[in-house]
Image: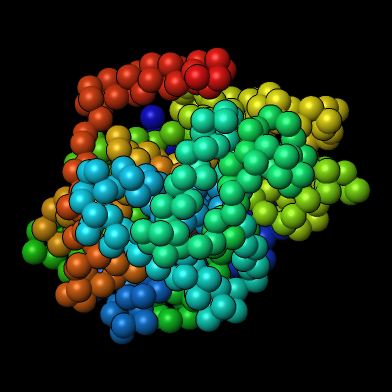
Amino acid sequence: MNLLHANDRAGEYPASYYAATATPLAPFPALKGQHSADVCIVGGGYTGLSAALHLAQAGLRVVLLEAHRVGFGASGRNGGQVGSGQRQDQDWLEAKAGREAARHLWDMGEEAKALVRGLIERHAMPVTFYPGIAHACRSEAEARHAWHYAEKLRTDYGYDQIEPLDKGAMRKIIGSDAYHGGDLDMGAGHLHPLNYALGLARAAAAAGAHIHERSEVHHIRHGARPVVQTASGQVTCDHVILAGNGYLGGLEPKVAARVMPINNFIVATEPLGERAAGVLARPIAVADTKFVVNYWRLSEDGRLLFGGGESYGYRFPDVVKTVMKPMLEVYPQLRGVRIDYAWGGTLAITMNRMPCLMRPAANVLSASGYSGHGVAMATLAGKMMAQVVQGQASGFDLLAGLPQPRFPGGAALRWPLLVAAMTWYSLRDRLGV
């Protein structure tokens, strides 16, 4: 199944709260005819747009091809959370990669957050970065672990932006008795994800990048100068950057073996008015510790944007029904609230939940599989691939050097096996294990 077309109308953003409130950006033309470039980028999300911006600023001729609209995929549909560090915590990274590499990976995560904030400011994007992400723990044991981990980050990594929260403090902030405490990371934050993607596109175009929408890539002919082909044109280039993430499909089998597309879902309530303060007392975002994560925040006009639920299939389910169940478990006081927007999207995960950075062929770079931690890391990955093209590969090579196992079962069986695993872990969520 081609996920570029499975759940959406060609060339249109989904009917999301983000699309309804985005600062409009006029469409870019489709690719037609033969073109030549230093770099051809496949995919117009954070990764591809960041790469295009940094390459164009360096004076290279860049052509970016997007099958639908820039920010169409996960970049324009996600929860907007800009988290600290990597998707895996520092304990895991120290055990798997050693303390020195773990330190570099932590610093990379901090650089990624700073890059997002710097790009917003430097290019005067219509985007506000709101500090603060609370991590809500389902058990006392998880809360204690969160407090110990915050202390580790303070002592070992010099990161002092995390405030431990007991059950009462968490209840005071999030207006729910569903959790036993956790922490609040004021060095992390959240933003309007589609406006950020559109801001990157404006900046890349202004720097000289040639962006083409409605230009789905169906084949890449590898060689000394790869040829990237669409239905109505082709680009001959020195380098190819693959930035399709969950929508890359079978365009590069080596990436597909290690990166699994999955769907996620969000609803936006009606404006809550005075009730909003009882849902979130501060303008922060929240994510909990369930395997099938719940995450939420308030919009600027006082709506609850709540993401969660599970679905085992590439087709989107009834999104309202899927998300309302976990939302009402957290906020039973919102029973009967009107849902004004509901949408789904496709992201990508890896076996180890770390980004998959690869050189799948000569003159080809790829970055994907951010596993729900992509706003900052995808932006940085795009910049790092731009640096590789210019001969600076240290950051890219550190991530690319992490073991990135294939999903078991190959293309035919990886999805059924993932469904079995997700079913098991979601059962553990429901049992509180």
Residue at 43%, 81% (x, y): give it: 207
Residue 157 location, x and y as percent? 38, 61
Residue lying farthest right? 274
Left or right of 412 on screen, residue 163? right
Q: Nearer the viewer, residue 148 or 378?
A: 148
Whether residue 181 is visible here, answered yes or no, is yes
Whether residue 35 is visible here, answered yes or no, is no
Left or right of 242 on screen, residue 68? right
Q: Nearer the viewer, residue 371 or 61?
A: 371
Q: Nearer the viewer, residue 50 or 281?
A: 281
Residue lying farthest left? 224
The coloring applied to the image is rainbow
Q: How many marks?
A: 0
Residue 337 location, x and y as percent? 84, 33
Task: Give the answer, above or below, for where 369 lies relative to 331.
Answer: below
Q: Quadrant of the N terminus?
A: top left
Q: Quadrant of residue 103?
A: bottom left
Residue at 21%, 36% (x, y): give it: 405
Task: Give the answer, above or below, for where 228 lies relative to 321.
Answer: below
Residue at 83%, 30% (x, y): give it: 333
Q: Quadrant of residue 192?
A: bottom right
Q: Nearer the viewer, residue 69 or 285?
A: 285
Left or right of 399 on screen, residue 49? right
Residue at 41%, 42% (x, y): give it: 371
Task: Give the answer, above or below, for where 88 lies relative to 316.
Answer: below
